[in-house]
Image: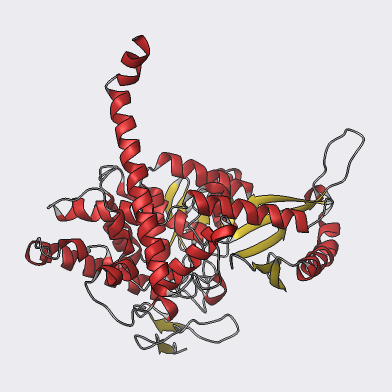
């Protein structure tokens, strides 16, 4: 049968072409995706406000270098610092969670999960919440709804989520509550004052995934800065919506860890620039037609059934059947004949879970990564010519990855911050100039906190506090 080939969307259009399971599509050509929607830069310039709107992380630079790779590493750290929650944003998110818990009445108990619990949250990340019933048993312990039989869970999930939706609809603090029927059904709502999105699910905490996330963040100091940069590189190009074939946060995190493991410690832990370029090139050039990837333990496996199984001896088959990770690879539906290009990535937290089975837009992601990689290399080569003292503060090596219009993002941040300071919140506080002033204040506050931390670290290293106590 002749395979049908369809090209990706023309550059600059709003949505990429993504084949869905119900379509008889065999192939499409990946196309690099441009910045889209509210993130698209309408006008550009080198003025202070333009730099704050399109390259806000430059205000968070606390170090600089004439070496291009060092300069890029500093910018990656600056972008990660820009995306950290301020104390006011932390306070606001806690208030939103408390308001949600109060709205759900005493009989429900709420657990914060997802990025807000692992340390990967950015200022406007969703609040993912797991909900359970509270019932007092004879042992004076709380029982979770998840310990009941699977059949009863299936019967009660929709009923319980429907009730939660109606509670949120009746509350004064939340709006747009809807029940989303999916593999893991959720209730989605908006917190009116902050416009933060809330997602409720029934006692499915994915504790193993969160444990792996925390462990990887501890093992790889560069992971969070790299993750935040790549997460927003996809976000501003509309490539993070899982239901549209994009990459979810956890899948992206595991992709980064996999690429870093394949680097085999060839990069210094502080060399974020070369690590970023390696990750972009690794996945841009990955042969997803033939290979699947496992992270823990690290390895490649053939996607097509029968390509390697026929060569195994009886002893090898028995060994694989007794190994949870290898037997799960054998059982996974690794190859989709309609979409042979899909990413196949084994979840280290659940070996039989393929994190890439719904990434219909992976060829667009690969093409985008390849384009960004080449553009960053180009600006690195041009740095000695264009990074002159006159315009050095406005130039960026990280621009090809994350440069966009952050005005609406800053407006949302201001709205969240003012929720924790209600006496200073007014309805007219969100115009563009006031928003940029808030952004400048956030950058100033970060630099002041960073300077104080550097001084304290210096004093501790030099024994200042011990000398002071001995006087």
Residue 418 lies in quadrant: bottom right
Q: How is the image coloured?
A: secondary structure
User: Taking the image as drawn, is residue 284 in sight?
Assistant: yes
Q: Position of residue 266 (x, y in %)?
A: 25, 45
Position of residue 145 in the picture relative to residue 241 (left or right) = right
Q: Nearer the viewer, residue 147 or 395?
A: 395
Seen from this angle, which residue lies furthest front? 423
Seen from this angle, which residue lies furthest top? 470
Residue 393 lies in quadrant: bottom left
The number of numbered discs placed on residues in the rendered structure image is 0
Q: Position of residue 118 (x, y in %)?
A: 54, 47
Residue located at (82% from left, 41% from top): 142
Seen from this angle, which residue lies furthest left? 385
Position of residue 202 in the picture relative to residue 239 (left or right) = right
Q: Up-down: is 35 above or below 297? A: below
Q: Nearer the viewer, residue 36 or 155?
A: 36
Quadrant of the frame with the C terminus: top left
Position of residue 198 in the picture relative to residue 1 (left or right) = right
Residue 59 lies in quadrant: bottom left
Q: Up-down: is 227 above or below 240? A: above
Q: Nearer the viewer, residue 261 or 46?
A: 46
Q: Position of residue 204 (x, y in %)?
A: 70, 54
Q: Up-down: is 131 above or below 194? A: above
User: Taking the image as drawn, is residue 347 in sight?
Assistant: no
Q: Position of residue 389 (x, y in %)?
A: 10, 60
Residue located at (40% from left, 87% from top): 13
């Amino acid at each position: 049968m002749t395979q049908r080939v369809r090209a990706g969307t023309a550059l600059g259009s709003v949505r990429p072409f993504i084949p869905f399971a119900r379509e008889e599509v065999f192939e499409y050509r990946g196309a690099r995706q441009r910045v889209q929607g509210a993130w698209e830069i309408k006008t550009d310039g080198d003025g202070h406000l333009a730099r704050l709107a399109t390259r806000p992380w430059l205000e968070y630079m606390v170090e600089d270098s004439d070496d291009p790779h060092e300069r890029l590493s500093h910018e990656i750290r600056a972008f990660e610092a820009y995306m950290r929650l301020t104390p006011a944003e932390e306070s606001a998110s806690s208030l939103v969670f408390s308001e949600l818990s109060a709205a759900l009445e005493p009989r429900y108990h709420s657990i914060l999960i997802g990025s807000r619990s692992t340390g990967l949250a950015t200022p406007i990340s969703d609040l993912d919440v797991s909900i359970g019933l509270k019932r007092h048993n004879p042992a004076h312990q709380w029982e979770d709804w998840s310990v009941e039989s699977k059949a009863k869970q299936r019967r009660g999930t929709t009923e319980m989520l429907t009730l939660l939706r109606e509670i949120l609809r009746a509350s004064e603090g939340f709006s747009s509550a809807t029940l989303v029927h999916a593999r893991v059904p959720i209730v989605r709502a908006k917190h009116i004052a902050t416009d933060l999105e809330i997602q409720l699910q029934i006692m499915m905490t994915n504790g193993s995934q969160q444990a792996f996330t925390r462990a990887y963040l501890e093992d790889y100091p560069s992971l969070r800065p790299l993750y935040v940069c790549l997460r927003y590189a996809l976000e501003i190009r509309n490539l993070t919506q899982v239901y549209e074939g994009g990459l979810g946060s956890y899948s992206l995190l595991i992709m980064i860890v996999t690429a870093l493991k394949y680097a085999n410690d060839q990069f210094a832990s502080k060399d974020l620039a070369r690590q970023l370029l390696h990750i972009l090139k690794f996945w841009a050039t990955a042969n997803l037609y033939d290979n699947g990837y496992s992270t823990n333990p690290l390895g490649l496996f053939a996607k097509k059934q029968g390509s390697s199984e026929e060569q195994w001896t009886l002893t090898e088959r028995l060994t694989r059947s007794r190994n949870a990770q290898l037997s799960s690879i054998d059982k996974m539906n690794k190859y989709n004949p309609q979409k042979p290009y899909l990413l196949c990535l084994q979840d280290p937290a659940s070996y039989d879970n393929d994190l890439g089975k719904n990434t219909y837009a992976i060829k667009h992601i690969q093409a985008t990564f390849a384009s960004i990689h080449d553009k960053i290399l180009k600006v690195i080569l041009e740095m000695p010519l264009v990074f002159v003292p006159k315009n050095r503060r406005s130039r960026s090596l990280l621009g090809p990855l994350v440069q966009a219009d952050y005005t609406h993002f800053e407006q949302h941040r201001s709205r969240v911050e003012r929720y924790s300071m209600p006496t200073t919140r007014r309805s007219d506080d969100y115009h563009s100039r006031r928003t940029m002033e808030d952004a400048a204040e956030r950058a100033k506050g970060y630099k002041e906190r960073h300077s104080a931390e550097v001084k304290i670290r210096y004093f501790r290293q030099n024994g200042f506090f011990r000398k002071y106590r001995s006087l």
